[in-house]
Amino acid sequence: MDSGFEMSSTAAAAAPGLRTGTARGRWVIAATVLGSGVAFLDGSVVNVALPAIGHDLHANLSGLQWVLSGYLLTLSALLVLGGSFGDLFGRRRVFIIGLVGFGVASVLCGAAPSTGALVGARCLQGVAAAFLVPSSLAIISSTFRPEDRGRAIGAWSGLAGVATALGPFLGGWLVDSVSWRLVFFINLPLIAATVLITLRHVPETFDHEADRRIDVPGGVLLTIGLAGIVYALIEGPAHGWLAGAVSAGVAGVVALALFVVAERRSSHPMVPLEVFRSRQFSGANATTLAVYAALSATTFFLVVHLQTDLGYSALEAGASLFPITVVMAALSARAGALAQRIGPRLPMTIGPIVVGAGVVVLSRVDTGSSYWTDVLPGLLVLAFGLALTVAPLTATVLAAVEDRHSGIASAINNAVARLASLLAVAVLPAAAGLATTGTGLDLEHGFSKAMVIAAVLAAVGGLIAWSTIRSGATVRTVTRLDVSAPCQDPCLREAS
């Protein structure tokens, strides 16, 4: 089963063969950049808006955890399934459905009268993004000529990266100037323009060799399993481990066990489990889980801490993360080239450990701390570690499987990154002893402990890489499709 991240030879034969220098080609790139950019933008602005949302809706930390987790839950569970729908029913059609769904969910988010309503709308946003984002890159892969495809993906990568980098600035400005609700309403004109461009200029493509059967049971079981476990992890510490939280946790574990059984028995599994027989593939994904959990936890806690305890405005808190984008843009390609020369094992080991060191520096940030002497040094060290890690990690994931599985491998790895963010937001507040009940946000007394835990997670990722990645492993330049992370999600790179 294809995931929607690559096209089959049949689809390629049916594709119009667009060129990057033509007007039609530029319109297709514009549509895919705008569409995926909406999801990337949304992912990077919501963190900045959390304190304002908490104040306006009287949400406690548990409620704000759900604002992030609801989106990540449905997105991570349905990402692979969304790519399959694009292959089968048409990439353009599924892309437009995802856009419209994301727009409707954005209206519901912006108009939410309560925390519960906002969480429900965020879950719908995640469903829509699971259809929207895989289709954006699949459209490029299936419409441009092979010799133009790398250039087209490079343009998509760079422009989408700009959208992600601008997110914290735009979100912070909207929150400070008007309201957090505009963080969601700003999606509407972008979506309307994208739908219009797509209908007029983007050709439809299919994968005519795709399995006609969609693994809906697998998607349902995975969603139920993750939802049950996340509910238990968030609500258990917040309201005591009552029967409801325990029952949800047990139901989630059972659903995940049934998911594994179902995937093994299915003739068209959403996740072909044989790819995990590769130690390198499993190890790279385990590294992804640890590093992205650390990254998500760090940016979640830091942005909120800067606003609630250090008096930063939303714009200042969002802008504080910009050095990560600068360092990643400057060094990621060089890190990928280094990994091609010496192999990925060393960069993937050292990088996460350096990330952990940066997070330890950030754990010292407290009331009265200076951005230039306390926050910025930690961010620069963290960003340098990420630059060492991400490009080799992504390349290793795809190089560990056969070419026919490269699409599903990319989808799995991106779903793992989203799952890491989900688990980090759900687990770490309780692990750090942060109060999840009551109104308002108070991270002052648990922030340092939470960051130390995140640092340990990152370092564990490095140890996993050292023990599972072969020194002479093949590395090839690939494109990673990252959906969104609380900070600028690294790395959208040009395929060779």
Image (cartoon, helix red, strand yellow):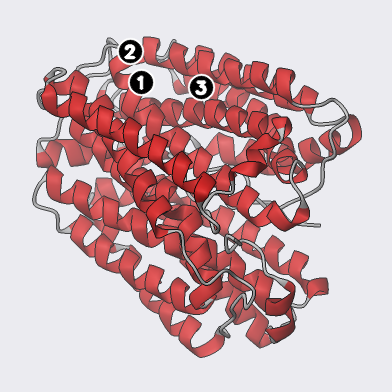
Residue at coordinates 51% horizontally, 53% vertically from top-left?
266
Q: Is residue 53 above or below residue 153?
A: above
Of all residues, the one furthest to the bottom in this rendering is 200
User: How many discs appear?
Assistant: 3
Q: Position of residue 332 (x, y in %)?
A: 72, 40
Name the quadrant of the C terminus: bottom right
Res 441 seen here: no
Q: Nearer the viewer, residue 466 or 496?
A: 466
Tell me if mark 2 has few (under 14), some (14-19) or many (20+) residues whose alpha carbon lies within 10 angstroms of its own.
Answer: some
Report the residue marked by disc 2. 432
**Secondary structure category for the residue under label 2:** loop
Q: Position of residue 135 (x, y in %)?
A: 53, 67
Quarter of the rendering containing residue 107:
bottom left
Labels 1 and 2 touching (C-beta < 8 A): yes
Residue at coordinates 52% horizontally, 72% vertically from top-left?
212
**Secondary structure category for the residue under label 1:** helix
Q: Amino acid at mark 2?
A: Ala
- The alpha-carbon separation of the residues under discs 3 and 2 comes to 26 Å
Q: Is residue 422 above or below residue 465?
A: below
Tell me if mark 1 has few (under 14), some (14-19) or many (20+) residues whose alpha carbon lies within 10 angstroms of its own.
Answer: many
Q: Amino acid at mark 3?
A: Trp
- The alpha-carbon separation of the residues under discs 3 and 1 comes to 27 Å
Identify the disc placed on residue 372. 3
Residue at coordinates 19% horizontally, 60% vertically from top-left?
108
Q: Position of residue 165 (x, y in %)?
A: 52, 48
Q: Amino acid at mark 1?
A: Leu
Judge left or right: residue 343 versus residue 354.
right
Judge left or right: residue 163 versus residue 176.
right
